[in-house]
Image (cartoon, rainbow, N blue to C red):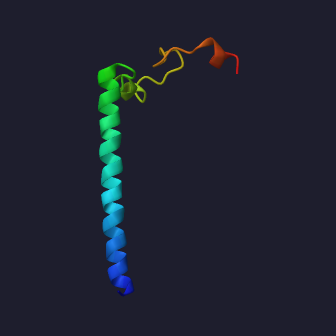
Amino acid sequence: MDIVQLQGYAYFVLVVLLVVILYSYIYHLYSSEKKGTKDFEKYGNIALNDEIDDTPVEPISKDEKNK
């Protein structure tokens, strides 16, 4: 087994690993949205609504204000 063949196997394993990570992340996003724990649609307008007087995406808790 030479270095070129080893690089080919490593590249294939890396691509498969990245595809698995991508699909697991997509599954996590859709499942958490279906459960209602997070609503990622409201995060889409962060770049558009970034003025100082705009309403925040999530309410700020009292613990975070004191920090």
Considering every residue shown, the one lying at the far right of the view is 67
Q: For the C terminus, give its image quadrant.
A: top right
- Between 32 and 57, the one lying in front of the other is 32
The residue at 70%/16% (across/down) is 66
Q: For the N terminus, give its image quadrant.
A: bottom left
Give x and y (percent) for residue 51.
50, 21
Give x and y (percent) for residue 46.
42, 27
- Between 60 and 17, the one lying in front of the other is 17
The residue at 30%/59% (across/down) is 16
- Between 17 and 40, the one lying in front of the other is 17
Considering every residue shown, the one lying at the far top of the view is 62
Considering every residue shown, the one lying at the far front of the view is 1
Considering every residue shown, the one lying at the far bottom of the view is 2
Give x and y (percent) for residue 10.
37, 71
- Between 3 and 48, the one lying in front of the other is 3
- Side of 59 relative to 45 (left or right): right
Give x and y (percent) for residue 37.
39, 21
Q: In which quarter of the image is residue 17?
A: bottom left
- Side of 24 relative to 53 (left or right): left
Q: Quadrant of residue 41?
A: top left
The residue at 33%/43% (across/down) is 24
Q: How many labels does the image show?
A: 0
- On screen, residue 59 above or below 47: above
